[in-house]
């Protein structure tokens, strides 16, 4: 029996996909993003997490199905949900069999059979850390080879995409960087939405509690207003890029 390590469950999520959603945060992530606000999800197993079978998790999800309506569903996030690929495959298949809309919120850095996972995925929320190899390495501490492999598979399978990108002062901000992002997005298809997310410091206290140094100490949060125009610009011409 495949078991999953679940960090937490949000019963009524409103920002992780369309409609009202149950959001399952799976444990484990290989990336070490400088702005990560959930370092408690990095370890692939942690004693305080829930260890569940796909059947047990489905029972929990089904409790909230009446609230999903025609637009909602379930979103698997993390950490990096693709690290628990066998478990994810099984629970995605069960959700689809139960008539539930499925979404994965991912940076595309996992393991296993991506085609099988994506064949049961209705929507990808894909987190672009950086669109250049050097920038990706600087932010995450990892190569971008794996996320490129995942994205290529998703593009070949025509999985709908919501793109997310965190705008960090000094790392991923400024007109030059965002123009480069715009050019990169023009090379992709099946994009339904682009969300530039302002860098925030809400997770800094977790680093202190875990006796870890926060990599972006003294970098101030970024306001939504500073990237509002770029959000409009990047979403303006999506229609021609969906197919």
Image (cartoon, rainbow, N blue to C red):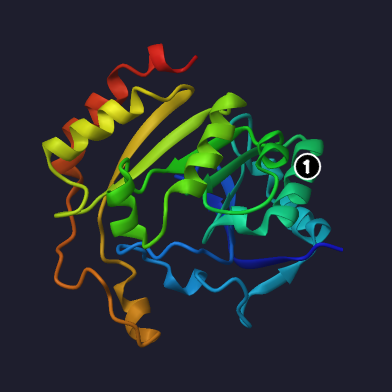
240 is higher (above) or lower (below) than 67 = above
Image location of residue 146, percent across then percent down: 51, 48
| Percent x, y of residue 162 | 45, 34
In this rendering, the count of numbered labels is 1
Residue 86 rendering spot, x and y as whole percentages: 75, 54
Reply above or below: 215 against 117: below
Disc 1 crowd rating (10 Å Cα; few below 14, some 14-19, many 20+) is some
Q: Residue at x 38, y 41 (%)?
A: 164
Q: Residue at x 33, y 51 (%)?
A: 136
Left or right for 151, reference 83: left
Give the residue furthest to the bottom.
211
Q: Along the line of sight, which residue is nearer the eye, 196 or 84?
A: 84
Q: Which residue is rendered at x = 14% and y = 71% of the image?
A: 218
- Rendered position, 106 above or below 156: below
Corner quadrant of residue 177:
top left
Look at the image and tell me whether residue 106 can be seen. Answer: no
Please name whichever residue, 61 or 117, is drawn nearer the observer in this view of the structure: 117
- The residue where tag 1 is placed is 93
Quarter occupied by residue 202: bottom left
Q: Position of residue 43 (x, y in %)?
A: 54, 74
């Amino acid at each position: 029996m495949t078991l999953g390590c679940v960090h937490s469950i949000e019963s009524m999520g409103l920002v992780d996909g369309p409609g009202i959603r149950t959001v399952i945060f799976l444990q484990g992530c290989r990336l070490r993003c400088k702005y990560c606000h959930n370092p408690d999800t990095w370890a692939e197993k942690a004693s305080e997490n829930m260890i569940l079978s796909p059947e047990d998790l489905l029972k929990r999800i089904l409790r909230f199905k009446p609230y999903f309506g025609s637009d909602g569903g379930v979103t698997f996030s993390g950490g990096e949900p693709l690290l628990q690929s066998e478990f994810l495959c099984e629970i995605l298949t069960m959700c689809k069999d139960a008539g539930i809309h499925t979404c994965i919120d991912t940076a595309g850095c996992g393991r296993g059979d991506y085609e099988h996972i994506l064949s049961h995925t209705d929507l990808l929320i894909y987190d672009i850390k950086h669109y250049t190899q050097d920038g990706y390495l600087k932010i995450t501490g990892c190569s971008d080879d794996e996320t490129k492999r995942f994205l290529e598979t998703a593009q070949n399978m025509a999985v709908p995409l919501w793109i997310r990108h965190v705008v960090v002062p000094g790392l991923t901000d400024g007109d030059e960087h965002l123009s480069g992002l715009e050019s990169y997005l023009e090379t992709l298809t099946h994009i339904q939405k682009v969300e530039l997310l302002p860098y925030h410091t809400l997770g800094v206290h977790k680093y202190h509690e875990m006796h870890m140094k926060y990599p972006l100490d003294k970098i101030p949060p970024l306001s939504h207003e500073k990237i509002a125009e770029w959000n409009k610009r990047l979403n303006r011409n999506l229609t021609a890029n969906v197919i």
